[in-house]
Amino acid sequence: MRAVAVIILFLAAAFVALWQLDVIKFDASNRGANRVSTRTQDFLEVLQTGTLEQVRESLANDSNIAVQDRDGKTPLMYAAAATNDPRVIFELVNAGASLNVQSDDGRTPLMHAALENNNPEIVLALLNAGADPTVLDAEGRSVYDLAGDNGILARTRVYERLEDLTTANFDPTWPSGYIVPVNGANFSSRINHLPNAPRAYRNGVHEGYDFFNYNVGVGIDYGTPVVAVASGIVRRVDQDYVEMSPLEYADIINEASIRPITPPESLDKLRGRQVWIEHPGGYISRYAHLTAAVDDLAVGDEVSQGQTIGFIGNSGTEEAVNGVQDEPHLHYELWLNDERNFLGENLPPEQMYELLALVYGRVGVPTTFTE
Ligand SMILES: [Zn+2]
């Protein structure tokens, strides 16, 4: 009899202890199925303070990515609020976490990051994964308003970026936290330097953005550094590039001028020395006509946003094959899923500049433009 009483007392004490530790939750709402279990609690803990490896392990253990706590918060919201590693965000998004789901207070993962996380990288990671920055919470506040309450974040450049985005024309097809590939530069104010501009010599259109030494806000020289527009993984780096001979170049140009479509191999030659980076969401940025890639940069390397990856040159151009350093410029492209669509494809200039403001921030867009 006494033994039974002791056992009951012990179980009661254990229950109270677990309750206090928040391991057992009482869900007042109708989310019976979503009651947070011990296992989920562990998962949420790992998302806030764990390493990328621990997060991967938890995901491999079949953790429920769509679970919501009694406030409607998802695992991605927990990570957004507390992790210090942007890769944790990408890992969850790749595992299927919903980017624009809202907790009971109407807040998205992006809003939780802006309000609670002091690391601007986490906000950028969510923007680059495709989070919608134009959603309002239950009180009608934007992600920019919430970031204003975060004393640390509000002193970073990301805060200005969020202000831009509250009035942007959100396009879920493209990321919205990239930077321009040359520090301090804006995209060219000449339409001829943008995608879709005709390139009569090869009967085709331009597929990228040119940064020459005028119309981009900063000086462009032979050797000006090129930076990664967003974090990602190096997919191509032409460390051993050999310039074409004048004869080889002439053959390619002659062939291109008589064929309706320039073969991809020829187009690739005309881009010269290149670096390609794959970003979360399947985007690929290509940096062309480089004079050099950064020493030791190799396929498979992780690069972070703003990291120097190469230097502007004129490789693959007529000037380069003739051995002079004239007309150095960066030719930059952004592709969605490799060869299918490039940023700006078929868009008239006004809409293209609007899209550039979304993807790279208003600071990257010229105020006026010309032919
Ligand atoms: Zn170009």
Image (cartoon, grey):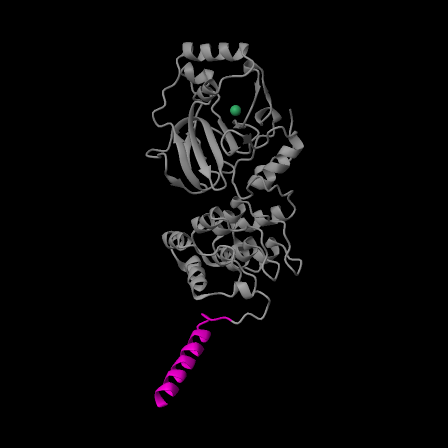
Relative to 246, is 157 above or below? Answer: below
**Residue at figure coordinates x 47%, y 54% from the top left:** 119
Relative to 9, is 124 above or below? Answer: above
Q: Could you say where residue 120 lies in the image, as x and y percent from the top left?
A: 49, 51
User: Is 145 colored magenta in this rendering?
Assistant: no
Relative to 266, is 34 above or below? Answer: below
Q: Can the viewer see residue 227? A: no
Relative to 214, is 303 above or below? Answer: below
Q: Main secondary structure of the magenta part?
A: helix
Q: Which residues are magenta?
A: 1-25
**Residue at figure coordinates x 40%, y 83% from the top left:** 8
In the depicted view, which residue is nearer to us: 303 or 60? 60
**Residue at figure coordinates x 61%, y 46% from the top left:** 165
Which image quadrant: the C terminus? top right
**Residue at figure coordinates x 45%, y 60% from the top left:** 44
Q: Could you say where residue 186 lies in the image, as x and y percent from the top left?
A: 56, 35
User: Is 6 colored magenta in this rendering?
Assistant: yes
